[in-house]
Amino acid sequence: MIFAFFFRCENVMTCPIRPIGSGNEHCPYDWLAVYDGRDEHSPLIGKFCGLGKFPFSIIGTSQYMYVEFVTSPAGPLLNTGFHFNVGNWPGHVETAGIKHGICDWLLSSDSLKDSSASEGIFLSIAHWYPPNTSCSYHIKGRTGEIVRLYFPSFRINRIESPILKYDGDCGESLTIYDSDRTDPARIIKTFCDTFSRPMEKVDFVSTSPSLYVQFESKTGSYSGSSLYYWAHYDFFNNTRFGDPVANTLCDEVMYAWKHPGGKIRSPMNSLIFKRTGGSDVRCQYKFITDRRLYARALIEVSAVMFKELPYNNNACTRCHEERVDKLVIWEEREKFQNNLACFCDNIPRPVRVISSADQMNLEMIVQGQHAITSYFKNPNPLFEAYYEFAHGPLCGPITLGPSPDGELVYPFKKALALVTGPMAAIPEHHYRREKCIWELKVAAQRDLWLHLEKARFGDRTCDSAKIEVYLAGRLEPRFIVCPENISLARDLPILSAADLGALASDQEPLPVLIQYTGDGQPGKNAFRLVWTELFHLPRNPDGSLAASLLQDGGGCDFKCPGNTEVCIPRHLLCNGIENCPNVTHISTMAELTRHIVWNLEQLGLWHEHKDNPNQLKELILHDESPEICLKEELNTLPYGKIFLFTLGVSVMMFLLIAILCRMCRRNETILKHTEY
């Protein structure tokens, strides 16, 4: 505090009392000069003179101030000099940043990281500053980061120690911009000394890596700002894996043509757990494709790491119904939500979920009552997953069956024109790696036999092409077929109804998944996978075959040779495809020939062989054997169609001859008239 008694007046009875003033125009004779530094070359704070108590404290910017007392040669006897006190005032805290000029700061994420601090701090100006002062704080994060600014302490006072008087509004202000500079269109908040209310512990969050804070004073001050604040700032990684959804906290969309696959996890920006106001935190990831590119979306959840809450009585037993932190995967089917999976606890191994259409959704739900305490500034992900899109046009239809027999052909011939030639969407040198996933439905209580009839692979390694067969509820494939084991693929074992997961006699089991992964260049890899639904012959308690399935209409017209105990209906005989499994290498001759008599009787051919029973001992009768197929061809010749065809040809020939004869007669008549 400075006490000054400077007054020049020759007659104390007639001179008025002059108040404390400053500046050359008010202090022409005696004055006290105060400098902000070590000597008279430092910035001048002011020249003071007059009589009375100086109303303000003067606070310098450093630990040094220089005071100079100047008097005129003819100083009056009435002036008694001055008196002031000197004391210490707390300085600024150490700010992790780069200072430009007097009070402009660059507070970067890199500087904060180098200081090993989790949050940066800067304070309001607590020392003198001249009128029209402007101080800035450019808080700059890395690419993909956003900035949070909040004030643990904030007070707004009237301007108590102005250097220049100002009677208008907003003599001093603090403005926060969602930008890297002053931009009137990007103002978040402005605080003024005359009409603003302080906002403590309110988060001001940028939408970009930069936040700009500017303090302005029209009056200046001898002892610091009228806006007293203590500001904290920190940075949050706001990296997204897809396209952000507008007006949402953390929703994203993964379009197949922009984000064809990759890693996803819970939001890296843990600030979202603090911004819901106690309501549940919901982050939805939507996977959308176009059937011209892909027909399916795949998500493989590799880790779920929600925290255990000691006071939460809701156990993770009914994931969809319980109010617990969880990860839900679902798809819309006929305008209804079809739940595919739900995770609310750690998983021992990755789980793969496949959509049945061209859209799928993954949603993370965190209970609001503990979101801040459990997950705010928690660096660990709450879940991790991988996604991709699959089943391009070359794969053909998604769903196959149920049918007694059928075939899966890759590549799908109708789609070849879409991916080759001048109209192809993908250049030839940019062919992607193809992944096809088919669902093969099987009728209730039927066994399934798969047979790789034809295959052509460009390379001889399993990396170039691989066919995997998955059964319902199994994480590992039941069969793997690739160029290295192609010979084994022609004799795959039968998948029984129990293997397929059939629960009841009248219900279809869950589909069998057949997955092909390989080079997507058309023509490089091709295969034809044939399937047959088989009847498994039931047995009575004594071991004999049950007669109910062997009656007419039961669909069991031909028992396959060997020890498989399966049969097929009559229409699958002699259709050019081996529908009975080839088990000659694992069956005895007795097992291969024991059903011959029964099969011949069912087909009405026993009378041709009953006179030579010895020949049947060496005969292995399968569904494409000449012994039955030649008879079948003769019995099924379309005699009616042949007769109608012959009759039609005869009528046409007769009409043609009649027309030619009529034309000839007409020409003869014309010639006769011409001669006359």
Image (cartoon, rainbow, N blue to C red):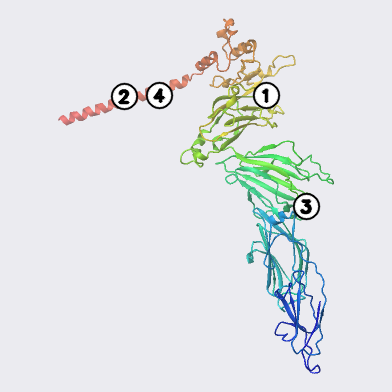
Find out whether the residues at labels 4 and 3 contact each other: C-beta distance under 8 Å. no
**Sequence-first disc among 1 and 3:** 3
Q: Position of residue 553 (x, y in %)?
A: 63, 21
What's the distance in space between the residues labelled 2 and 1, CA to CA? 65 Å
Q: Position of residue 65 (x, y in %)?
A: 76, 73
Q: Is residue 227 visible?
A: yes
Residue 496 is marked as 1
329 or 609: nearer the viewer: 329
Residue 657 is marked as 2
Label 3: element kind: helix
**Sequence-first disc among 4 and 2:** 4
Label 2: element kind: helix
For disc 4, the marked residue is 648
Work out which quarter of the rendered image holds the N terminus and state it: bottom right
Q: Amino acid at mark 1?
A: Ser
What's the distance in space between the residues labelled 4 and 2, CA to CA? 15 Å
**Sequence-first disc among 1 and 4:** 1
What's the distance in space between the residues labelled 4 and 3, CA to CA? 87 Å
622 or 434: nearer the viewer: 434
Find out whether the residues at labels 1 and 3 contact each other: C-beta distance under 8 Å. no
Mark 1 is surrounded, within 10 Å at the Cα level, by few (under 14), some (14 to 19) or many (20 or more) other residues, namely some
What's the distance in space between the residues labelled 1 and 3, CA to CA? 52 Å
Q: Amino acid at mark 4?
A: Gly
Residue 90 located left or right of residue 572: right
Q: Position of residue 109 (x, y in %)?
A: 69, 56
Mark 2 is surrounded, within 10 Å at the Cα level, by few (under 14), some (14 to 19) or many (20 or more) other residues, namely few
Residue 425 located left or right of residue 89: left
Of circles 2 and 3, the one toward us is: 3
For disc 3, the marked residue is 372
Q: Position of residue 518 (x, y in %)?
A: 57, 33
